[in-house]
Image (cartoon, rainbow, N blue to C red):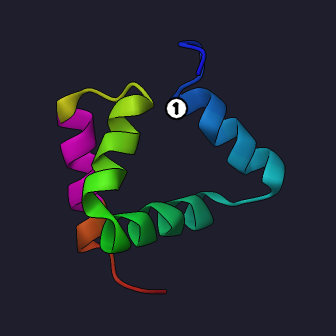
Amino acid sequence: MNNDFGKKQWSALFTELGLSEAEMRRWHQLFERHHPQDHGRFLSWLGLNNNEVQALRRTCAEQTDG
């Protein structure tokens, strides 16, 4: 993949698809729940630093269904 593809471009794809911010958070929550290690690697691939990855993963783990 091109190094220019990252968090901003991924979010833009989700937005173009019609996902709301809440739906994007839910997607991350499910990814974290079902595939936590892959979710972490994916976030790193998007260009998030280790602190950002850990914070997002922690937030996903704390969220409840719904």
Q: Quadrant of residue 2?
A: top right
Q: Is residue 49 magenta?
A: no
Q: Quadrant of the N terminus?
A: top right
Residue located beneath label 1 in the image? 7
Q: Which residues are magenta?
A: 51-59
- Please state if 50 lies on the left or on the right of 26 as rendered: left
Q: Nearer the viewer, residue 2 or 65?
A: 2
- Please state if 5 lies on the left or on the right of 44 as rendered: right
Q: Position of residue 42 (x, y in %)?
A: 40, 42
Q: Secondary structure of the magenta portion, mostly?
A: helix
Q: Position of residue 58 (x, y in %)?
A: 20, 58
Q: Is residue 10 above or below residue 20?
A: above
Which residue is drawn at the image coordinates 33% and 33% (left, top)? 44
Q: Is residue 13 above or below residue 8?
A: below
Q: Secondary structure at mark 1?
A: helix
Q: Quadrant of residue 9?
A: top right
Q: Is residue 1 above or below residue 13?
A: above
